[in-house]
Amino acid sequence: MSASARLAELGLTLPTVVKPLGAYVPAVRTGNLVFTAGQLPLEAGALSQAGKVGTDVTLEAAKAAARVCALNALAAVDSLVGIDTVTRVVKLVGFVASAPGFNGQPGVVNGASELLGEVFGEAGAHARAAVGVSELPLDAPVEVELIVEVA
């Protein structure tokens, strides 16, 4: 089943690509790889969540925000090469704005990883990093970047 058909089956629609917040592009292709810029949990131009995970944002809310980030990353891929050209998700990097003492970054980033598995099946299994940071742009609780292989 194609990725676009799977998205439809899941009741998901790729959002409009988020306008870059700086001097960069949403995604770049080199050879058979597409790298996305870091994607925030923006929905209709606004953050779905804000603040530090562990104080301002719960783990479950941050996990949901990571899922939004992954959808935004897929939208960036789609705008460049078409979502159905993706043959494999290679790597996902998740950054989590963490309150002191919060160490549940892997659980937050699972929101993005699980979405990729739902959309791409076995081809969605990927290498990953989940990194705790002190601050993210716009006070976002999570940011995700993606590397995919395309046909």
Image (cartoon, grey):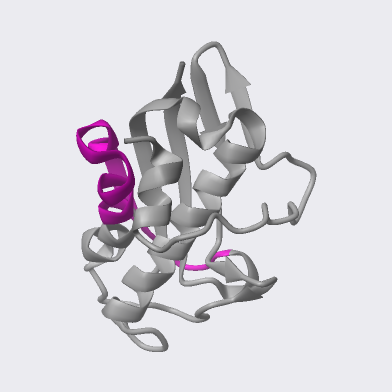
Please identify the residue farthest to the top as the structure is shown: 31
Residue 138's place in the image compared with 8, above or below, is below
Would residue 36 appear left or right of 131 to someone viewing this image? right
Please identify the residue farthest to the bottom as the structure is shown: 56
Q: Which stretch is magenta?
A: 113-136
Which quarter of the picture shows residue 46? bottom right
Residue 17: horizontal and vertical position, in percent?
67, 52
Would residue 99 appear left or right of 46 to someone viewing this image? left
- Image quadrant occupied by the N terminus: top left
Question: Which residue appears at 55% of the width and 61% of the height?
Answer: 40
| Closer to us: 21 or 29 | 29
Residue 73: horizontal and vertical position, in percent?
52, 48
Which quarter of the picture shows residue 128? top left
Q: Can residue 94 be seen by looking at this rendering? A: no
Residue 58: horizontal and vertical position, in percent?
32, 84
Residue 127's place in the image compared with 130, above or below, is above
Would residue 49 appear left or right of 79 to someone viewing this image? left
Q: Is 124 in the magenta?
A: yes
Question: Which residue appears at 41% of the width and 44% of the height?
Answer: 5
Question: Which residue appears at 27% of the width and 63% of the height?
Answer: 105
Q: Can residue 25 be seen by looking at this rendering? A: yes
Residue 12: horizontal and vertical position, in percent?
44, 61
Number of marks in the image? 0
Question: Which residue appears at 46% of the width and 72% of the height?
Answer: 141
Q: Is 134 in the magenta?
A: yes
| Closer to us: 88 or 106 | 88
